Amino acid sequence: DIQMTQSPSSLSASVGDRVTITCRASQRIDSYLNWYQQKPRKAPKLLIYAASSLQSGVPSRFSGSGSGTDFTLTISSLQPEDFATYYCQQSYSTPRTFGQGTKVEIK
Amino acid sequence: EVQLVESGGGLVQPGGSLKLSCAASGFNFSGSAMHWVRQASGKGLEWVGRIRSKANSYATAYAASVKGRFTISRDDSENTAYLQMNSLKTDDTAVYYCTRQVGYCSAGSCYSPFDDWGQGTLVTVSS
């Protein structure tokens, strides 16, 4: 199974900050990497697929990059509604493993 | 509008069984692979398993943690996916989500993220 490791596990940031979350796969997964946002007591929401493609309706302040084993989710200017937990997920092979999550909290 | 509505969660004793349903609407259900993902309280997301479409032989796959105990099925005439859970353990306590796999193809590669999710149904395994 492919292991997905996110860092950091949590971070504190202020509105307007640039935030970067990293995700590392235990083996090469090309660009088969997705990012999801989850708010408390809500289902996850797809933000980015294919490592860097923005899902329809997602604000352009979200961006993704990377290929192979190392990936990044960037929020260019953090907004109040962005405080949430973010998960990466590989769709290269089954089982479709997720990272452990990164909680973005208000500083 | 795509809708996925899970039902069937509840309290069950260890060793017991429960069957979850996921009613779908607003998209081509019969042509879509459907997945189940669970989340224990305060924990991360765990992929449980999936069922592919008829065109892909209704192929199923499961996480090692549930293989042999859980079974995913679907009824395309009812636009519903199911998760049959047997021999339940306390570690299976979680909110269970069903989710739709979508496909985006570009430059010869096709990517398959989970685009739509249900609201989740809580399964509690406890004596």
Image: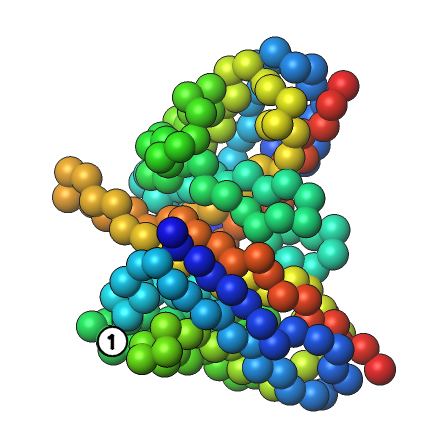
- Can residue B87 be seen in the rendering of this structure? no
Tell me which residue sits at (59%, 42%) in the image. Answer: A38
Q: Is residue B107 found left or right of B40 in the rendered image?
A: left
Question: Looking at the picture, how far across and down is residue A98, in whole percent?
Answer: 53, 50
**Residue lying furthest left:** B108
Q: Nearer the viewer, residue B82 or A26?
A: B82
Query: In which quadrant is the C terminus of chain A drawn?
Result: top right
Is B80 rendered above or below residue B1? Answer: below
Name the amino acid, label 1.
Answer: Lys
Q: Which residue, given by chain and number where applicable, does mark 1 sit on? A: B54
Question: Looking at the picture, how far across and down is residue A27, in whole percent?
Answer: 42, 46
The answer to which quarter of the image holds residue B12 is bottom right
Tell me which residue sits at (65%, 15%) in the image. Answer: A15
Q: Is residue A2 found left or right of A51 in the rendered image?
A: right
Question: Looking at the picture, how far across and down is residue B38, in whole percent?
Answer: 59, 62
Q: Is residue B39 found left or right of A87 in the rendered image?
A: right
Identify the subunit bearing mark 1: B
Is B24 rendered above or below residue A6? Answer: below
Tell me which residue sits at (56%, 76%) in the image. Answer: B20
Is A49 rendered above or below residue B100? Answer: above
Q: Is residue B26 found left or right of A41 in the rendered image?
A: left
Q: Nearer the viewer, residue B119 or B67?
A: B119
- Can residue B26 be seen in the rendering of this structure? yes
